[in-house]
Image (cartoon, rainbow, N blue to C red):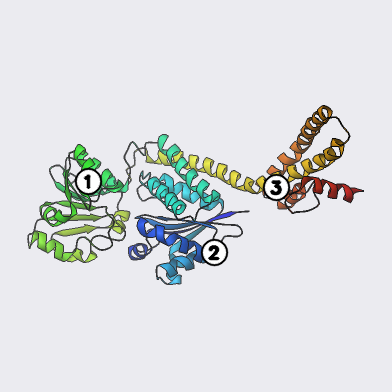
Amino acid sequence: MSTIGCLSLTGCRASLALLERSSYPADEQLARLPGLLAASGADQLAVLSTCERTEFYAVWSGEPDHDGLVRTLAADRDLPYDAVDAATVRFSGADAVAHLFRVATGLESFVIGDADIVGQVRTAAELCRTAGVDGLELDRLMGAAISTSRRAHRRTSFERAGRSVGAAAVDAAAALNDGSLAGRRLLVVGAGQVAAAVVARAGEAGASVTVCNRTRRRAERFTAAGAEVVDLAQLGTCLAEADVVILGAAAPHPLIDRATIDAARGQGQERLLLLDLCLPRTVDPAVRGMPAVRLVDLADLRTMNLNDIGTLAEDAAIAGRIVEEQVERFVAWLAGRPAAEAVRRLRADSEAIARGELDVLRRTLPGEVYEQVERTLIRAVHKLTHGPTRRLVDAAEAGDQQLVELLTNLFGTSTEPVTDPVATANRIRAASV
């Protein structure tokens, strides 16, 4: 029977530096997934890497091997095994399923009800599928997580409230600017999901928004929301004019450091607020020592109260119940997977006996009579096997492997697949004489 496991490394237990080194940008992840699967010893593998977490979801044909996942992550990221082991949490079976469903729904985010995380789960599923490291169980798991998130967000105010890390960053920026961003010059670096949330919330807050992105064409859609759009080459110019900068674009190296700020702003004492929402970080932490500059990174955001009370408790309870219901459905499906082959074997063996007898009758009965006998006998066999088949499925879902094996071979004498029904029937008949 297939088993599912999860290795979870999040900002709740790991330092930002460790989380940063453990992250997998999408373009790199696609190339590394086949090697990660081979090293882990799992049969299927998906990696969920966001600004808050790096998680491995794996499927094994036997018992889960979390130690293998720890070794794989540590070796691939050149990290000490003990450091990774101490910072990770392990989930197995239904607990692993529940964890992913809660993550996809936003119940495990530091912004409860985060609407962006489900898109990241979808990306993780697409990457493992493209890399060829998926399988039926993992595909079904990721799809069920996405479906669960949609159900929860339809029945709560999570989505209507625009709950996301990007929106929370704008709210935090307002709180750090005397409660208002009205008239402030806000620069957004990036053009993805985070940027979209930032632009929408900042526009509502009355800020003057500029979007700076590596590919200007991709950011043009933000002009409809009233934002000015420039390309990344103009970052220095924009930085000189900004009051608040929110960074949501992945980059292999920092986009802003002390030299960048000095070149853009000189020795001026006008305050600059930087909010870095990226992993790896795109603002050099050394800027914290600069006068009139305040840096807020993900670790800082995690300590701030970004969850307004409102209907949050009620929404979280509703979402939690939906997660529980969907976990039960998925676990029942997974438990019934071994029954599929067992049911096929049970029916094949019973039909083999019937067709063996029919083969004898074929030589003695007229064609029309034979066809009628054949239909009647096969129908009777199906009726006779209905009860054992239903009991077999129940046994599989209950984990009663002994009963599964007993019922699987109820009409057979071998555990080998049936390839020749007539020969099988003859063997069974000979054995019963």
Instruction: Look at mark 3 in the image and give the residue it sits on.
Output: 342
Give coordinates of residue 67: x percent, y percent: 52, 66
Q: Nearer the viewer, residue 306 or 373?
A: 373
Residue at 53% from the left image edge and 44% from the top image edge: 327
Q: Is residue 317 above or below residue 365?
A: below
Q: Residue furthest right?
A: 433
The percent coordinates of residue 305 (x first, y second) are: 31, 50
Structural distance between the alpha carbons of marks 3 and 1: 55 Å
Neighbor class of circle 2 (other Cα within 10 Å; few <14, some 14-19, many 20+) is some
**Residue, disc 2:** 41
x, y (%) of residue 149? 43, 42
* Amino acid type assigned to the residue bearing label 2 in the image: Gly
Q: Position of residue 222 (x, y in %)?
A: 22, 41
For the residues labelled 2 and 1, the Cα–Cα distance comes to: 43 Å
356 on left or right of 80: right
Real-space CA distance between mark 2 and mark 3, rounded to the nearest whole angstrom: 26 Å
Earlier in the chain: of badge 3 and badge 1, it is 1
Tag 3 secondary structure: helix
Q: State yes or no: discs 2 and 1 in contact (Cβ < 8 Å).
A: no
Closer to us: 251 or 17 = 251
